[in-house]
Image (cartoon, rainbow, N blue to C red):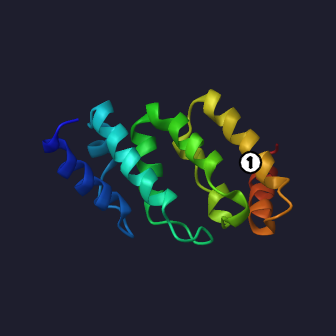
């Protein structure tokens, strides 16, 4: 990626991190895979450097929007979710990812992750949220 691409990536990342993201699914779908990867990396970095995880980091909503529009990022999203410190995360970690994970391979991996969170004894809030989601899904 060259220097000219950095500013648009950061600008798009900022738009996706707003309290109410200002990008449309169509706009995100038109991104090249390379640009989408760079925007994902920008948002991922913001999530990973959050000072706390009880409240949803601002970049999370943008990540979900981006992955819905760019399905090739589903595996990267699950990698991120798996690597967050589940014992310190709020219930947001278990909610809202279904729409961003339409491919069966990734749904299966997400269900496995939900089961791990459901059985987490060091975070009752996350465990309860994962249990509710699994129960509602009949799993």
Whole-percent x, y for residue 18 in the image: 35, 67
Whole-percent x, y for residue 110 in the image: 67, 41
Whole-percent x, y for residue 31 in the image: 27, 37
Which of the 4 image quarters holds residue 109? top right
Q: Residue, x 65% and y 36% (percent of image)?
A: 107
- Nearest to the observer: residue 137 or residue 3: 3
Rate crowding at label 1 as few (under 14), some (14 to 19) or many (20 or more) other CA atoms within 10 Å.
many
Q: Quadrant of the N terminus?
A: top left
- Nearest to the observer: residue 93 or residue 122: 122
Q: Is residue 40 above or below residue 105?
A: below
Residue reaching furthest to the top: 105
Q: Residue, x 35% and y 62% (percent of image)?
A: 21
Task: State left or right for residue 121 relative to residue 65.
Answer: right
Which of the 4 image quarters holds residue 26? top left
Q: Residue, x 26% and y 45% (percent of image)?
A: 27
Reading the image, the residue beneath label 1 is: 114
- Nearest to the observer: residue 71 or residue 77: 77
Q: Is residue 124 above or below residue 35?
A: below
Query: Dot 1 lies on which element?
Result: helix
Q: Quadrant of the C terminus?
A: top right
Which of the 4 image quarters holds residue 13? bottom left
Task: State left or right for residue 14 relative to residue 2.
Answer: right
Task: State left or right for residue 88 relative to residue 36.
Answer: right
Task: State left or right for residue 94 relative to residue 116.
Answer: left
Whole-percent x, y for residue 122 in the image: 82, 64
């Amino acid at each position: 990626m060259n220097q000219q691409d950095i500013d648009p990536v950061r600008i798009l990342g900022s738009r996706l991190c707003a309290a109410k993201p200002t990008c449309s699914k169509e706009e995100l779908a038109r991104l090249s895979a390379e640009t989408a990867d760079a925007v994902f990396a920008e948002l991922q970095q913001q999530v990973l450097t959050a000072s706390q995880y009880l409240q949803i980091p601002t970049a999370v909503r943008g990540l979900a929007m981006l992955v819905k529009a760019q399905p090739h990022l589903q595996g990267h999203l699950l990698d991120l979710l798996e690597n967050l410190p589940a014992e310190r995360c709020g219930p947001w970690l278990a909610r809202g990812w279904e729409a961003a994970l339409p491919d069966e391979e990734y749904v299966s991996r997400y269900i496995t992750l939900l089961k791990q969170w459901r059985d987490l004894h060091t975070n009752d809030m996350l465990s309860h949220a994962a249990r509710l989601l699994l129960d509602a899904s009949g799993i």
